[in-house]
Amino acid sequence: MLPVCLHENSSRLVSLWDIVNLFDVREFGRLQCLLECLTASAHATTATVVETSALAGICDAVKQFCEKYGYGTCRDMAAITADRMRRTAAESPGVVEAEARNIQNLLAREVHYQKFLWISKLGSECVDNDNLFGDAVTRAFPSSSRDIKESGNCIAAECGTAAVFHLMRAAEIALRALAADRGVQYPDAALSSKQVGDLLAALDGKMAEMRKADSKLWPSKDVKDAQIKFYHTAIAELRDFNEAWRKHMAHAHEGAFYDSDQAESVLKHVRSFMQALSGKISEGSSTPLYWTSA
């Protein structure tokens, strides 16, 4: 994956792949410690020759580590050194010390050129989270799962605008599920092909019909009022999403960028909305036209 340039801080380059594919810093530290101990031991010994098996084993581990993270130069050198140490069986301490120090420095140099990203506590909870909005949302709106997960990765990377983009797509899936639940249909097109504005207008029409419907269609006035409040609140939230964020995010202009704080605020709004909606609505089922209970 190519690096992503953050508009909020154009001097930083971030690869979302590096965020999701976490770097094993413990293994890097362990290998550096082993190499340092070996060089110190070889330097301090008074023996004429020392066994080379220890260095060969460490080089094998270095090779595996480098293969995982794409450090080709150090990987190849570790493999060559391991092979040479096994073929000689014993070598002078000076040679072992030099070879170990060479691998240690080469590994450090490879990691030095790797770009890392510090992630805040909130961001660390968002990284590669398959259940960022909770079980109920995951079950009710499975089609939104990938966008929700990507929004979390973007929050972690402080790519606020990208996070809002994914959050608006997740909310759009909820909108289409809501439209299907209310029986919105078009004779010439599927719901998936209709624009957000069209769906909101159709839902307004459904709400008008519900308000005019005879109260006898519900078991009580309280149930009718609860249903009207539920759908009215959901539609109002979706309209606010569309007016406040979606329309602006979709077009290139100065107001179309979002910083980290703004993106986190949008995430909280969309998450609360979808959690509330998932209590009644889902992609795979529909509620009664007129609720039988609140």
Image: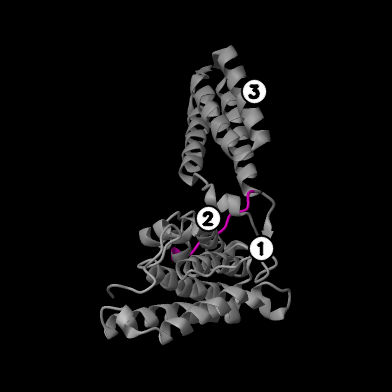
Around disc 3, counting alpha carbons within 10 Å, would you say few (fewer than 14), some (14 to 19), or many (20 or more)? some
Colour approach in the figure: one colour
Mark 3 vs 2, N-terminal side: 3
Nearer the observer, 37 or 34: 34
**Distance between mark 2 and mark 1 Cα atoms:** 25 Å
Find out whether the residues at labels 1 and 3 contact each other: C-beta distance under 8 Å: no
Residue 132, horizontal then vertical, whole percent: 43, 60
Direction from residue 101 to residue 54 in the image, left or right: left
Give the residue displayed 49% in from the left and 46% down from the top.
25
Residue 241 visible, this angle? no
Local secondary structure at mark 1: loop
Q: Residue at x 29, y 72 (%)?
A: 292
Numbered label attached to residue 12: 1
Residue 264, compared with residue 84, is above or below; it is: below
Q: Which mark is residue 146?
A: 2
Query: Which of the image's four quarters has the C terminus?
Result: bottom left
Name the secondary structure under disc 2: helix
Asked if residue 266 is positioned above or below residue 73 in the image, the reply reads below
**Residue found at x 35% / y 67%:** 279
In 3D space, how far apart are the residues under numbered discs 3 and 2 (Cα atoms)?
Answer: 43 Å
Measuring 40% from the left and 83% from the top, which residue is drawn there? 213
Mark in the foreground, 2 or 1: 2
Task: Give how far across and how far down residue 180 sits, in percent.
Answer: 49, 66
Q: Which SS type dominates the magenta stretch? A: loop
Tag of residue 80: 3
Compared with 165, 213 (above or below) is below
Residue type indicated by callout 1: Arg
Q: Which residues are magenta?
A: 114-121
Relative to the observer, which residue lies in front, 258 or 187? 187
Nearest to the observer: residue 264 or residue 140: 140
**Location of residue 105 by image quarter:** top right
- Sequence order check, earlier mark of 2 and 1: 1
